[in-house]
């Protein structure tokens, strides 16, 4: 079998002035040399040797010869040895593997002089050869890839079987592999069955299917093709009927409105539906290194090879952003890439019921002044449901929509790009799909008028009407007749639908408003506005910049909740229930909330007062503490008084033991005086622990000479009452106050409390005030308070120099004191 590696003679008939170069000269008409007849035999052995020597030399060079551009019947390309190269050295065809492994081998076409290899066509993309053993050949009238050992077919051109041997497969400089019968009749070509790439000269009536991954040429998720109507290009995902991307409508000249002067215009314009048997070639086709391919991530891209940088340069790509993906935000929701955080938002008058679903707030058709049209400029929208031609004026188009209310969502009146002299009225009934903002008119932008109820776009009676796709919540204001005048920092351009925020360094274009968060996002006009000098804000402005120059192009501005709405007459407060028009302290008239209601600036309404747990005032808490202290003192006094009476009664019944009491008292008094002289008790360590002597009250009373000043046990006296009385008499009762409270406590009020406390511990019940009098004296600033007398626990009846008889009497009188145990 002849091999493609033989080097045949140069045939100038295959050459052309356009393709002549040193490389292409080696590839032309190699097929003719394969079947060339052998030279005639010579009888002379020397002549035979001379004739055979050059042939042997050529045979030795077969491994180093370049491949040809054609494959004839009976020849083959193996996965290890040979390949085809187009005559001009543009493309190469052969076997290849990806991912550094030979477990999956493919037959494909790639650019010959581009590194790394860029594959433009793969024959067995869904049926790779599991090893590196495979051949490409012409058999039974078909080009096919087979396993030479098992005979399994991995790919075939699927032509009817033929016994003819005049078959030739040629790789063109356009990248097209053409299968000929009898040398000139085209039977099949790879341009009819593209994989993921369109090349210049291809017919655009087929489809491109992306690779599964960059290293896997199997069919992927995205398909690029002409629409069913043939007037658009579309990308579908996962073979679904729902489009992933849709081009603009093609005009009657079969060129793209959205790709003016792009190379692909020419390809689509020239290569329309025709005879499949005709070779896809044209004398003016430019075989430059330009390709259109569907990549694995879902983008259709036009790239061109740059010889200077030796890399592919991206010329065009769609979808260029998320908003270019078909109906990315869902129906009735506009898409804008200006604001990266809030790309999608429902149109004014519509509300969200899901992640990507917006519906009309009111489904009924309003009448009179309650229905209105919102006008949006430079909007892109999906195909209309109804197209009415030859409509003379926009007013007639508008009436066409109103007649279909409530089923008419919107209309658009414009002059057709296809029929230059006619005007069309486009009407949408079901939904508004694929809405995009800020689309130029030559890119498919329209002026769209959306029918809504006025009550659905003005949330409050004082709210401003929407500006473009932005709803203006109260209190923000775009004019003197709406919103709160304090928030009148916005301007609306009704021609473009752009909303601007006026502040130092601005104005700034507002891209999104978030009413629930009380903030909005605005675009910075220029990068130099991000300087620190432009952060200055008006001191009394309700607006605060919370995020300055985020991503170098945005600012986030928040606003404070408003005060009650301003008003001039009572009817101005109709929109604010439970409020009346009035003023506080002669200030501006506002809609003030009625009694039992309070203004909530976040909810923009008068909210009812809610009962809450009452907090105990500090003065009341101090009063309770003082009353508790007085109660404890009174209880102690009563207990001590009762105990004295009981003890005195016991002494009267036990007169016979009086002498023993005197003797015991004498010893106890002497012992106590000794302890006082020693300065206190001392601990004694013995086996029985610490001995604590106990004395009765009479012994302590006698030993201290009726608690005289000379026998005080320390500066504090014998208790708080003694100390309080002493400080009272010295006019220093404020010294009783805790030092921590002296700065916050009223000294006069403290003196009043101390006065009342001393009155409550008077000896005589008639000198003590009742509890009701105590409350009056403490709460009233004008109530008169008696001067206290010397209180209880100051022994007025005992004398330090009493005789034995008086001491005897004193013991009997004071025997009601608590006796030590």
Image (cartoon, rainbow, N blue to C red):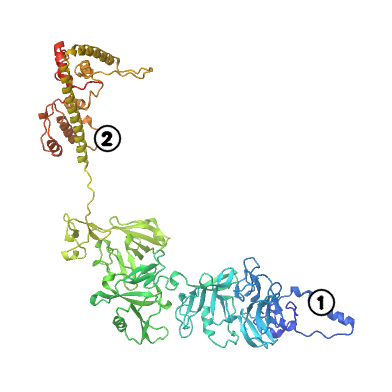
Q: How many marks?
A: 2
Nearest the viewer among 31 and 724 is 724
Residue 12: % across, % down: 71, 84
Quadrant where the image shows the C terminus: top left
Which element is circle 2 on? helix
Above or below, 186 relative to 661: below
> Which residue has dot 1 on it?
56
Residue 92: % across, % down: 65, 75
- Ranked by sequence position, the earlier of labels 1 and 2 is 1
Nearest the viewer among 376 and 599 is 599
> Which residue has dot 2 on it?
740
Is residue 569 in view?
Answer: no
Image quarter of residue 585: bottom left
Tell me, yes or no, whether the two marked residues, 1 and 2, touch with CB atoms within 8 Å: no
Q: Is residue 520 left or right of residue 3?
A: left
The crowd level at tag 1 (other Cα within 10 Å; few <14, some 14-19, many 20+) is few
- Disc ID at residue 29: none
Residue 244: % across, % down: 46, 73
Nearest the viewer among 96 and 509 is 96
Image quarter of residue 528: bottom left
Above or below, 347 relative to 560: below
């Amino acid at each position: 079998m002849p091999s493609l590696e033989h080097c045949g003679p140069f045939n100038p008939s295959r050459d052309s002035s356009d393709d002549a170069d040193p490389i292409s000269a080696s590839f032309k008409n190699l097929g003719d040399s394969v079947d060339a007849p052998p030279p005639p035999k010579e009888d002379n052995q020397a002549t035979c040797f001379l004739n055979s020597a050059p042939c042997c030399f050529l045979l030795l060079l077969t491994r180093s010869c370049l491949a040809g551009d054609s494959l004839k019947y009976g020849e083959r390309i193996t996965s290890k040895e040979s390949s085809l190269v187009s005559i001009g050295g543009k493309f190469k065809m052969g076997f290849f593997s990806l991912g550094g492994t030979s477990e999956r081998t493919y037959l494909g076409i790639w650019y010959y002089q581009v590194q790394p290899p860029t594959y433009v066509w793969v024959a067995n993309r869904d049926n790779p050869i599991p090893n590196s053993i495979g051949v490409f050949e012409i058999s039974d009238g078909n080009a096919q890839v087979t396993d030479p050992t098992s005979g399994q077919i991995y790919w075939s051109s699927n032509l009817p079987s033929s016994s003819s041997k005049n078959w030739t497969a040629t790789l063109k400089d356009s990248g097209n592999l053409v299968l000929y019968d009898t040398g000139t009749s085209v039977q099949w070509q790879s341009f009819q069955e593209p994989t993921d790439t369109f090349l210049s000269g291809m017919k655009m009536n087929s489809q491109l299917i992306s690779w599964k991954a960059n290293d896997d040429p199997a069919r992927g998720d995205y398909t690029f093709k002409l629409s069913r109507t043939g007037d658009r290009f579309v990308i579908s995902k996962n073979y679904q009927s729902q489009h992933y991307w849709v081009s603009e409508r093609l005009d009657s000249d079969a060129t793209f409105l959205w790709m003016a002067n792009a190379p692909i215009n020419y390809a689509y314009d020239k290569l329309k539906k025709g005879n499949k048997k005709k070779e896809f070639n044209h004398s003016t086709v430019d075989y430059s290194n330009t390709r259109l391919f569907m990549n694995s991530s879902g983008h259709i891209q036009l790239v061109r090879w740059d010889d200077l940088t030796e890399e592919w340069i991206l010329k065009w790509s769609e979808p260029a952003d998320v908003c270019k993906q078909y109906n990315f935000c869902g129906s009735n929701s506009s898409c804008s890439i200006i604001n990266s955080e809030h790309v999608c938002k429902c149109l004014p008058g519509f509300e969200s019921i899901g992640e990507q679903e917006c519906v009309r707030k009111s489904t009924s058709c309003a009448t009179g002044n309650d229905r209105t049209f919102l006008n949006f400029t430079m909007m892109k929208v999906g195909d209309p449901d109804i197209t009415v031609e030859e409509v003379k004026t926009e007013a007639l188009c508008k009436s066409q929509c109103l007649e279909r209310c409530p089923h008419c969502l919107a209309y658009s009146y414009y002059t057709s790009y296809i029929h230059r002299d006619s005007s069309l009225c486009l009407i949408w009934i079901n939904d508004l799909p694929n809405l995009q903002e800020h689309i130029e008119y030559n890119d498919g932008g329209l002026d769209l008028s959306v029918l809504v109820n006025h009550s659905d776009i003005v949330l409050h009676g004082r709210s401003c009407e929407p500006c473009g796709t932005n709803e203006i919540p109260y209190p923000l204001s775009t004019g003197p007749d709406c919103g709160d005048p304090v928030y009148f920092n916005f301007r609306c351009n009704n021609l473009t639908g752009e909303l601007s925020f006026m502040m130092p360094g601005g104005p700034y274009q507002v891209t999104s408003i978030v009413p629930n968060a009380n903030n909005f996002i605005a675009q910075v006009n220029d990068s130099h506005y991000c300087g620190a000098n432009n952060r200055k804000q008006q001191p009394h402005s309700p607006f605060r910049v919370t995020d300055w120059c985020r991503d170098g192009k945005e600012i986030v501005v928040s606003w404070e909740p408003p005060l009650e709405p301003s008003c001039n007459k009572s009817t101005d407060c109709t929109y604010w229930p439970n409020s009346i028009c009035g003023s506080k302290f002669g200030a501006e008239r506002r809609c003030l909330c009625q009694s039992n209601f309070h203004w909530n600036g976040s909810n923009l309404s008068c909210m009812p007062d809610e009962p809450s747990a009452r907090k105990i005032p500090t003065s009341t808490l101090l009063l309770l503490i003082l009353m508790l202290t007085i109660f404890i003192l009174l209880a102690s006094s009563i207990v001590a008084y009762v105990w004295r009476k009981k003890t005195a009664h016991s002494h009267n019944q036990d007169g016979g033991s009086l002498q023993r009491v005197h003797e015991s008292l004498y010893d106890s008094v002497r012992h106590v005086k000794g302890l006082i002289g020693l300065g206190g008790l001392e601990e004694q360590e013995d086996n029985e622990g610490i001995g604590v002597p106990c004395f009765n009250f009479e012994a302590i009373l006698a030993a201290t000479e009726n608690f005289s000043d000379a026998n005080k046990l320390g500066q504090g006296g014998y208790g708080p009452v003694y100390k309080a009385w002493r400080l009272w008499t010295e006019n220093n009762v404020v010294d009783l106050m805790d030092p921590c409270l002296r700065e916050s406590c009223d000294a006069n009020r403290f003196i009043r409390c101390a006065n009342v406390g001393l009155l409550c511990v008077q000896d005589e019940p008639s000198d003590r005030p009742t509890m009701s009098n105590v409350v009056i004296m403490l709460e009233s600033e004008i109530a008169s308070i008696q001067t206290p007398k010397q209180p209880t626990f100051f022994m007025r009846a005992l004398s330090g120099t009493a005789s034995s008889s008086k001491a005897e009497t004193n013991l009997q009188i004071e025997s009601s004191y608590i006796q030590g145990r």
